[in-house]
Amino acid sequence: MNKSFLSVAALLGALSVVLGAFAAHKLKQIAAVETVAVFETGVRYQFYHVFALLIVALLSEKFSNRWMIWAGNCFITGIILFSGSLYLLTALKIAESTHGQLAGVITPVGGLFFIAGWIFLWLGVSQKNK
């Protein structure tokens, strides 16, 4: 078991719950419906990939290889870039900032890290100890 990935997954999972509760209770009072939807997409994808990171952490003992490490790192990076950019985009929309395009450019890069993480996870379980 990879304790580092397990620890990060636990913290990011707790953060997902906090952010989801914030969206459900406070954000809906201060932001437009479309803005809340963007934020909730960030929370949803963060939660999905927390579970992916947990899987990597648990499987890394049985499948101890570089692909599993790459998978975990990609999932963490994807959460930071994809979900983080959506949270930033939400904050910028609430502040009525015109800098939202930069945050929007980061989002698909985070998505690519998510895709890479899933591919590396597949490689990691396909090639046992390489």
Image (cartoon, rainbow, N blue to C red):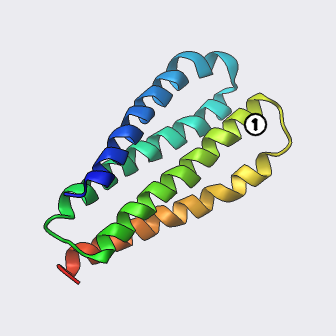
Q: Quadrant of residue 46?
A: top left
Question: Is residue 118 visible to the viewer in this orientation of the structure?
Answer: no
| Residue 24 as seen in the image, left or right of residue 65 | right
Question: Is residue 25 visible to the viewer in this orientation of the structure?
Answer: yes
Which residue sits furthest left? 62
Depicted 97 relative to depicted 25: above or below: below
Residue displayed at 54% across by 25% down: 23
- Residue 102, position in %: x, y? 76, 53
Amino acid found under the numbered disc labelled 1: Leu
Marks counted in the figure total: 1
Residue displayed at 50% across by 65% down: 113
Depicted 130 relative to depicted 38: above or below: below
Depicted 94 relative to depicted 60: above or below: above
| Residue 102 as seen in the image, left or right of residue 41 | right
* Residue designated by label 1: 92
Dot 1, crowdedness within 10 Å: few (<14), some or many (≥20)? some
Q: Which of these two is toward me, 47 or 71?
A: 71
Residue displayed at 23% across by 84% down: 130
